[in-house]
Amino acid sequence: MSYTTVADVKTYLGIAGSADDALLATLIASADAIIESYTHRVFQVSAASTRYFDALMDVDGDTLYLDKDLYSIGTVTNGDGNALGTADYVTSPRNSPPYYKIVMRSDSTAAWTYDSHPENAIAVTGMWSVGGTAAPTDIVHASRRLTAWLYAQKDNHADQDRAFIAGNTTVLPVNIPADVKAILEPHKKRGAP
């Protein structure tokens, strides 16, 4: 599921024909991959999916640490095969996604556990992204802008993707447009390089 559409990029670029539609679709996929690689996050998904967690390695006391951003929870199945009710746990942060951990409530009788082996014992089904099925507006714009920038590179016949020396100065190429980088920077996952 792309963060922008071919139609939106064509409008942004002022393109009327359909000759480059396939290229633009490919560049949108590339732009989205760059955004996800830079931020270490996925901003939207098309459907819920299940991720599995180790009942020992991913749990510390009452806390299950998630490995990806979780926008909404469908079900939580403990390692003993029992589904947990929403009264058994709270999310962190408490009031708004994305969530990064699930904590057993102090008044719950449930505890993180497993039957035969801890590996992949706990299953969490939900929307594993920052924004559920809709990426934040600024990410949509970053995808559109980055796609347009990638599209312009096809006509750039100069060798501007390598560093070159001008006098006593080494000039490095631009990785991605500065305005796109400014949009993405606040979305970077904490602790990501």
Image (tube, rainbow, N blue to C red):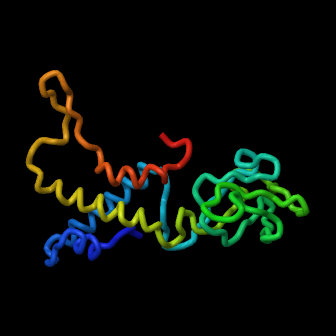
With respect to residue 40, does 163 lie above or below?
above
Residue 165 found in image quarter: top left
Residue nearest the observer in this picture, 132 or 173: 173
Residue 145 falls in image quadrant: bottom left
Residue 18 is situated, as x and y percent measured from the top left of the image, at 16, 77
State the count of labels.
0
Relative to residue 88, is residue 187 drawn left or right? left
Q: Residue at left 81%, top 52%?
A: 62
* Drawn side of residue 120 relative to residue 69, left or right: right
Which of the image's four quarters has the N terminus? bottom left
Above or below 181: residue 73:
below
| 189 lies above or below 25 | above
Q: Residue at x 16, y 73 (%)?
A: 15
Residue sitting at the far left: 157
The correct choice, above or below, for 31 with respect to 10 in the image is: above
Residue shown at the point (75%, 49%) measured from the top left:
59
Residue 169 in percent (x, y) is at 19, 25
Q: Position of residue 136 (x, y in %)?
A: 47, 66
Position of 74 with respect to 15 (left or right) is right
Q: Residue at x 64, y 67 (%)?
A: 125
Q: Which residue occupies the foreground of this view, 164 or 36?
A: 164
The x, y position of residue 140, in whole percent, is 39, 66
